[in-house]
Structure formats: C-alpha cells, structure tokens
Amino acid sequence: MIRHLYVHTPFCAKICPYCAFYVHQGGAAQQREFVAALRTEWRRAREEFPLALETVYFGGGTPSILSAELFAELAQELPREPVPQEFTLEVNPATVTAEKAAAWRAAGVNRISLGAQSFDPEMLKLLGRQHVPEDIAETCAVLREHGLENINIDLMFALPGQSEAGWESTLRAALACGPRHVSAYALTYEEDTPFFERLQRGEWRVDEAREIAMFERTREMLGAAGLVDYEISNFAWPGFESRHNLAYWRGADYLGLGPSACSTIGARRWRNVPDTRAYAERIARGEPVRGELETLDAATRARERIMFGLRMREGVALEEFGGDASRLKELEADGLAFGDGRRVRLTARGQLVADSVAGMFV
C-alpha cells in the first residue's frame, strides 16, 4: 500500500544559481501541457498501485507558479477518501496571490513550505531570488487569511559573504513570521551550477568554522522559540513535524509523479525522464516515462535508514546496523554516537559532522 506521494513541478520563473534540481522556465502553454500529462500519469498510477495516501507533497521547481485554475485541475485527480493527513505545497513568496491561496485551501492543501531562504536583501540578490524580505511576511499573512496556518519557512546559511550577525537577523525575522516549522540548511555547492563554478575558480571558499558557528546559533535561537530539532536541519513545534519527510527518512515506500520524480517501492527505485517535453510526449503516446531503474537489496535499504535516521532526534533502531556493527563501534569510540540498548543517536559532536558520518554507510 503506497501512502506517500511526491509530485514534481519543474517550472521556475528564474533559475537560481545554486540549484541542481531538474527545473526550467516555461510559459502557460507548456504548463498546461504538463498538467494534462501529469493527470494522465496519475490515473495510470491509481490503476497500477494500491494507494491509501497519508501525505502528498508538491515540490519543484515552483509549484505555486501554476495558475489557480491549473492547480485546481491537478487537485481533481487526488482521492477524496481517505483524505491525506498532510498535503504540502512548496511556495515562492513572489508567486502568491489571494486567488491562488484560496484555490490551494479548497484543494485540500494544509501545509505550506515557503522558500524564503533569507531575509537579507543582499543575500536574496546573491541567491537569485525574485522576492524581497517584505514579501515573506506579507505572504504569510495572505496564507493565514485563507486558513493556511501550518507554514514552514525554508532558510539557507553559510552563504558567501554572509556574516553571523546577518544570519541571526534572518532567524529573528523568520521567527517574527510565526512559522510552525523552520528548515535551515547550510549551502551545498552542487556540481553543474554557477555557484559551484565560482567555488572552483577560487572566488569563494568553504568556511567550516563559520558554518558550525551558524549551525549552533540556529539550534540555540530556534530551540529558545520552542521549535524542536527533530532532524538536524529541521525544527518544529511538537506535532508539526513534516510527516512526508519523516516517511522518507524512515524508509517508507513513496510514489513520485512528474518529470525527474523518483519513486521507491519495495526493492525497486526509478526516476522519471528528466525532460518535460519528452515526458509529456511519452504520456501522450501511452509510453512509459520511467528510467534509471535500480534494484535495492535489504542491506541497501537498511543503510539508507541508518544514513537518514542518524540525522533525526529519534535515532536508528539498533538492529538496523546488522553487518555495520563495526562502524557503529567506531562512532561510539570517537564520541560521535551513543546507544541506549534499543536505539542509536548522534552526540552533539556527531551532529556537527553528520554528513561525514552518513557517508560511512553509503
């Protein structure tokens, strides 16, 4: 039974220079073609898989770039019974209108992930964002006026030229918006992006000490505001954790729709063709859109649960380690993890090098 659905909307008004996801610009005609293809893929999926959706996540790209009319058409395909417990929509502050917010609420959206990234105008320019700081608070107000109270604010830190004081200012501004969830990620320089190229040319450098200081300050400030770090980069009021992301991190099966969307079901993982035009054309011809099929064995899935689970406050069940018990002993000996006989968690020191720890289980 598939309980988690991800829908990838590839359109953006402008491509951010740090982004490595499959995204592109696209006008109204291409968006309409995409929606028609997606509706067909969704109908096929309902015939192929047993579905009882608990979470739905529309990501991208910028799903909020779609018109209220097109979004309503998409939402018609979602099952009404059972009603998903969580329906998240990624939103760019520069794309929100009262008409769209009303359409989202009517379609069943009950959680918004707002791509603020920063409240510093200079940092927003650097990131290629189209909104200004004032847009973020105004967007939150519009969303709440239409009953969308459960708001996550996405932020990025350790940006080139960003000071610790500037980051603290962004955190204070984000908290003033009253979010129930905050995601705060350090900038990652992804290959094949303009940011990576500038790093390679020596224009920028990674400052690990500054990144650690910002990370620790993030935990302090968000924790003091009542937001619990249930995952290293994710903070929420109790009861407002992202159910969809928790399902990913715990190793649940999920179905992905749309160009470049990934799915993991049982021992199979695949990615849809990362080309919107080819995706729509294949759908129209009745051809499959899946590619890059991978077969997963039990050990691989267990290692993935370890990688993601160690980033969570709840940790990982001890039995998941199985053949990786020697690595677990290494972590404990180095003071990076601890166990209570049932579960294993990272220490505060281990959280600072969580990515390196996770890399041990790749």
Image (cartoon, grey):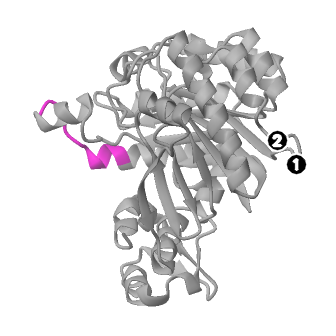
Q: What amino acid type should be assigned to the residue bearing mark 2? A: Pro
Of all residues, the one furthest to the left in this rendering is 201
Residue placed at 67% from the left, 40% from the top? 42
Question: Mark 2 touching mark 1, by CB under 8 A?
Answer: yes
The question of residue 208 being in magenta is answered with yes
Question: Helix, strand, or loop for circle 2?
Answer: loop
**For this rendering, which residue is in front, 65 or 352?**
65
Q: Nearer the viewer, residue 54 or 266?
A: 266
Q: Which mark is residue 82?
A: 1
Q: Which element is circle 1 on?
A: loop
Q: Point out residue 147 in the picture as x, y percentages from the top left corner.
A: 84, 24
Is residue 242 inside the magenta stretch? no
Please state, as top left, top right, bottom left or bottom right, where the C terminus lies in the image.
Answer: bottom left
Q: Which residues are magenta?
A: 202-211
**Pointer 1: residues within 10 angstroms few (<14), some, or many (20+)?**
few
Residue 173, x across and y down, in percent: 58, 24
At x 40%, y 33%, the residue is 275
Q: Residue at x 80, y 17 (%)?
A: 102
Identify the image quadrant of the N terminus: bottom right
Q: Residue at x 44, y 35 (%)?
A: 156
Residue 87 at x, y percent in the picture: 74, 39
Q: Which mark is residue 79?
A: 2
Magenta span: helix, strand or loop, mainly? loop
Type of the residue with mark 1? Pro
Q: Is residue 117 left or right of residue 64?
A: left
Instruction: Please state if 143 lies on the left or on the right of 260 as rendered.
Output: right
Query: Does 128 sit above or below residue 110?
Result: above
